[in-house]
Image (cartoon, rainbow, N blue to C red):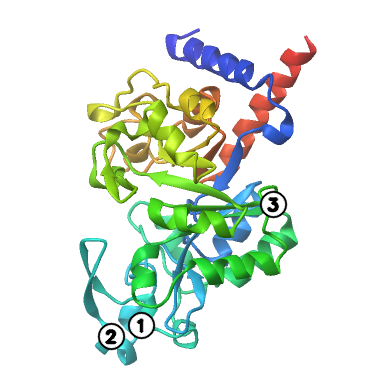
Amino acid sequence: MGQRSAGALARKSRAAERLKNKRVKDAPIVIAHRGASAFRPEHTLLAYRAAIKMGADYLELDLVSTKDHVLVARHENEISQTTDVAKHPEFAARKTTKTINGHKWTGWFVEDFTLAELRTLRARERLPKRRPGNVAYDGKALIPTLEEIAQLAQKRGVGLYAEIKHPGYSASIGLPLEEPMLRTFKRYGWDDAKDPVFIQSFEADRLKMLRPFTRLRLIQLVGAPRTPSGQIRLDCSPIPNALFTPEGLRRIAQYADGIGVTTTWIVPAGPGGKLGSPTSLVQDAHRAGLLVHAATVRDENSELPAPYRRGDPGDRAYQRSKGDAAGWLERLYGLGVDGVFADDPGIARVTRDRLLAGADRLRRA
């Protein structure tokens, strides 16, 4: 047996051992990142329906507001990359430049369109070079509303994992996201910590504001270490990488139920994607009473750590070719994460269920 195969078997055994004491209801959740975005254009009902068929536990959606205060799912409020708006001459004059959270954006923005106007547009693949197969679905889907996604989720028995996108900015222009979001969730009977809904945000101040108004679970998002997006605001002060000290985690636990972190917080990655030793973040967060959800597992070599890339690096298609996402998922599950965001929820579900079956055999042994 080769060294790589032996190592993979050892990791799988350790992952199954780690899950041995977890009950099925406590097993790591599979969060379909913007739907099954590896197979369909993200944030479309096409992507969400595909994710449900693949076994996702939760559908992830980013929420932004239309001009008439209807919440819809888009990766950003700027929509030139995810819709065909540039092909609509009737909206050419709405192209503009805005500064949002300190960053300058040029394009078309959801908040400048009514829902009726937005419905004349069609969704398209945001990353056509990485996912050329998804381009076949360009123009086939509308921009979905939160209402439509909630209806689909409840009908099919899955949960929602909603990010309020740039909520401070939205509030500043008179289109706050929180109230219509909570109102929609309540219509579907979702208003308790036991309900299948998570609310996530990078902006700690908005989560703190939300806490007194909902019992739904709140997740503090944190970007990659040592980057501007890796700094969030606690008590209106920028908190850098030292955020994840035991004291910092206890402070997060005062207003949130968990953290959503890039995988590099859990297993640091160096130059070329080489992995370092795992940190103690998962264990430290659990001691503080926080869930840990890891983002984002993607199938492409370009998005995987070096040990999980497959194929010939000299091949022109190497970067977008599929690597060993299952192996990377096994590693993360084995480190005790409570959930993973995955562009391919099918492989995340199959890998988790295989490890749970192995854990069940260990319990019976």
Residue 64: % across, % down: 44, 69
Query: Could you say which quadrant of the image residue 21 lies in?
Result: top right
Residue pointed to by mark 2 = 94
Above or below, 95 against 360 in this view is below
Residue 39: % across, % down: 51, 54
Along the line of sight, the residue nearer the viewer: 28 or 231: 231
Residue 291: % across, % down: 54, 36
Above or below, 61 against 107 in this view is above
- Label ID, residue 112: 1
Q: Which residue: 57% across, 20% down?
A: 15
Q: Is residue 329 left or right of residue 242?
A: right
Along the line of sight, the residue nearer the viewer: 166 or 81: 166
Kindly check if marks 2 and 1 are in contact, taking CB atoms under 8 A apart as contact.
yes
Query: Could you say which quadrant of the image residue 164 lies in?
Result: bottom left
Along the line of sight, the residue nearer the viewer: 67 or 93: 67
Q: Secondary structure at mark 1?
A: helix
Above or below, 121 against 52 in this view is below
Give the crowd class for mark 3: few <14, some 14-19, many >=20 residues within 10 Å.
some
Q: Earlier along the polypeptide chain: callout 3 or callout 1?
A: 1
Residue 363: % across, % down: 75, 15
